[in-house]
Image (cartoon, rainbow, N blue to C red):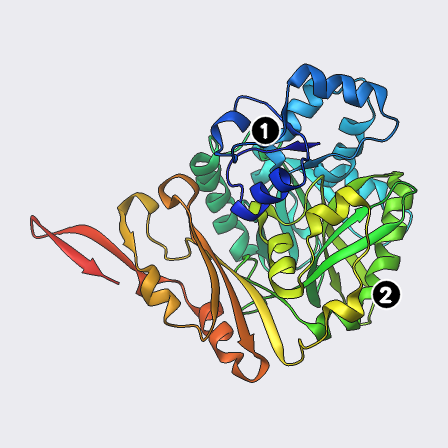
Amino acid sequence: MIFVNEPYVSQFFKRTAKDNNIPIVGTKIAKKIGLYNGTNIIGEDEAIEIVRKTNIPIIYMTSENSIDWITKHLAFSDLPEKIKFFKDKLKFRELTKSIFPNFIFKEVRVENLKKIQFNELPLPFIIKPTVGFFSMGVYKVSNFEEWGNVIDSIVAEIDQTKDLYPEAVLDTSSFIIEQCITGEEFAVDAYYNSIGEPVILGIFRHTFSSDEDVSDRVYTTSKEIIENNLKEFTEFAARIGGLAGVKNFPVHIELRRDNDGALLPIEVNPMRFGGWCTTADMSFIAYGFNPYLYFFLQKKPNWSEALKGKEGKLFSIIVLDNSTGIDINEIKSFDYEKLLSYFEKPLELRKIDYKKYSVFGFLFTETREDNFIELKNILDSDLNEFVSTDINIEGKMDQVYR
């Protein structure tokens, strides 16, 4: 069964559910999310009984906002505990300590941030909410001078995001400080099948504009990225899945390969693939198989077939987060047509209510490898060239294009 929830469900996902008669749990939000007529919607009580009677149910959620419902209604199962292994970043570090014994991390309450003995922390380090989402509240600290500014930024961001997501998705009362993992970063969509074996459904390289960048701007998949990492990432996922004991369980894994070639996990997001229906939809666009359907049917991609004819092509997801430095409430418009003109082959543009979510949208693109510059340009951009604002100049309201 499927749990759909805010902030976003793609048309591709809705079609997948309807055309394959996959049951969607009829929560209040599910009834408002614009599902297609004829979708197989089941009652909440029926969903609970299915889980009671099924040894290892196959469940997918489009958003971690559904964790609240699962925690409340499926407490009799081991599912809430399995979710917490991954969603709570402190519990995840404790779970994986046996295979990453030298990794340094510690928890700190938000009210104690200013009391930390800074000289006892590993430099550089990453600080992020113990329960977090979408790079919110994530900062890299390299020295003491940065630390004060980061604390101020965290306090400000808590105020801005406190009503966006439920506490089970974003809880800024507690933070985890952990050593900075260097090296190439990847995002991996996978599921653990009925016997706990991992099946990789997509691999994306997370490209950054600089060493200090912690944003989610560009994720890219390609034939080379898949072929170079598939075997190693499958073995990596198997180690983590073995510790958690998960079966029929979808995940979105974020990891890095350090300078010595070792793989280290950043985090594992439970019960879903990439957020906002992004990475799994892109795997379909790029390679022609449906990751959602493959999970429900317990199928494995035939990667040798899927990658035929993909030589020299980069398939990227551009996350248009508000990096302008302008308060979102002061932004009047975003020039999507201008954005599209910057790319040689836009595949799909998803406009988002940026006043509500502080994200302008998501752009799916295809780029020739020898034209990587177009991806580099959007990586380096703060997006000011696409926004317009109304500001008061000498008492007169003038539209200013930035």
Q: Position of residue 396 (x, y in %)?
A: 7, 50
User: Mark 2 and mark 1: span between their CA atoms?
Assistant: 36 Å
Q: In the figure, 34 relative to 326: above or below?
A: above
Give the residue drawn at x 50%, y 38%. Answer: 7
Give the residue drawn at x 62%, y 44%. Answer: 16
Q: Position of residue 386 (x, y in %)?
A: 32, 62
Decide if residue 197 is on the left or right side of residue 284: right
Secondary structure of the residue carrying tag 1 is: loop
Question: How many neighbours does mark 2 have within 10 angstroms: few (below 14), some (14-19), or many (20 or more)?
Answer: few
Is residue 153 among the parts visible in the rendering? yes
Between residue 206 and residue 338, name the one nearer to us. 338
**Residue of label 2:** 231
Quadrant in which the C terminus is drawn: bottom left
Q: In the figure, 67 relative to 246: above or below?
A: above
Between residue 186 and residue 211, name the one nearer to us. 186
- Asked whether the residues under the numbered discs 2 and 1 touch, taking CB atoms below 8 Å apart as contact, a structural biologist would say no
State which quadrant residue 3 falls in.
top right
Q: Position of residue 104 (x, y in %)?
A: 78, 51
Amino acid of disc 1: Glu
Q: Residue furthest left?
A: 395
Question: How many neighbours does mark 1 have within 10 angstroms: few (below 14), some (14-19), or many (20 or more)?
Answer: some
Q: Which mark is residue 167?
A: 1
Decide if residue 380 is on the left or right side of residue 45: left
Is residue 62 among the parts visible in the rendering? no
| First-in-chain label (2 vs 1) | 1
Amino acid of disc 2: Lys
